[in-house]
Image: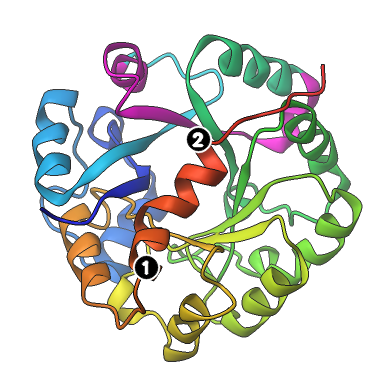
Amino acid sequence: MPPRAIDCWVNVNMGDYEPPEHLIRVKEDYLHGGADFFRSFTPEELMPLMDELGVEKALIQVSVGEDNPRPFDFVERYPERFALAVHVDPRGMMPVLWKLEEMVKQYPVALARVVPFGVDVPPSDPVYYPLYAKCTELDLPLSINTGIPGPPMPGEGQDPMLLDRICLRFPDLKLCMAHGADPWWGVAMRLMIKYKNLHLMTSAYSPKRLPAEFVHFMNTRGQDKVIFASDHPALDMRRCITEAWDLDLRDGVLDKYLYANADRLFFGPRNPRY
């Protein structure tokens, strides 16, 4: 039996749209993706792979206001296996946040998600503050991409240091850096030591490429801080899981990385404040 796992970043509808130029550049120049890079899935296509790899649950990427029924089909038919990760454009302000709140009430939503390079607005900008307040109110975890992005897009807004004041001003916000933190791994680790509610997800980052000092952090003070994710099919689930198995981790740490930390942060009890 493979170790149990939760994959916290899975895309199921990438083949349903014409890919934007920046994602084409990621495929061709950065990840050197194959024919499956831009494809879509049904639950019946994805679950056999998950079962083979020990992935008990997956978080399905969806956007606020998305009208494609595909992601919702996963959580409506198999809520025990799938939950939604809802991408939010913080510039939409309250109308977008009201839609997010409606989705949280209607579907199994595990977290909200923002990608600063996609809007070219750093997470320290006040336009994000209503989102931080709403996620705190809903007791809903929020992931924010950090590290220089693969696409040829501005990257300075994804420096983890920009989250320092956010963690100070919103101490109850459950925050998770996503897509690693390259080249600012040291800053990310120091911030996670500093703030109890700050975590990091290794989505879109090959586990075998994780820096040695970060693997040491996973084995020591970061045992409860680091969460597995693939970005399937952009970065293949099988590749990421099997590379995670091969990491030099102490007893019990692999289970925390692959499963327990995500289960606690994204599927643990919530205490909404409304």
The circle on residue 267 is: 2
The quadrant in which residue 104 appears is top right
87 vs 27, nearest the viewer: 87
What residue sits 40% from the left and 69% below the top? 253
The circle on residue 202 is: none
Residue 237 among those drawn in magenta: no
- Disc 1 and disc 2 in contact, CB within 8 angstroms: no
The outermost residue toward the right is: 169
Sequence-earlier tag: 1 or 2: 1
Left-right relation of 165 to 145:
right
Determine crowd level at label 2: few under 14, some 14-19, many 20+ residues with C-alpha closer than 10 A: some
What residue sits 8% from the left and 36% below the top? 48
Left-right relation of 26 to 274:
left
61 vs 199, nearest the viewer: 199
* Amino acid found under the numbered disc labelled 2: Phe
**Tag 1 residue:** 252
Say which element carries label 1.
loop
Residue 81 among those drawn in magenta: yes
What residue sits 29% from the left and 21% below the top? 74
Residue 47 rendering spot, x and y as whole percentages: 15, 33
Left-right relation of 165 to 84:
right
* Amino acid found under the numbered disc labelled 1: Gly
Residue 246 rendering spot, x and y as whole percentages: 21, 76
Residue 238 rendering spot, x and y as whole percentages: 16, 56
Say which element carries label 2.
helix
246 vs 161, nearest the viewer: 246
Magenta highlight range: 70-94
The quadrant in which residue 45 appears is top left
178 shown above or below 159: above
Left-right relation of 87 to 18:
right
What residue sits 62% from the left and 84% below the top? 186
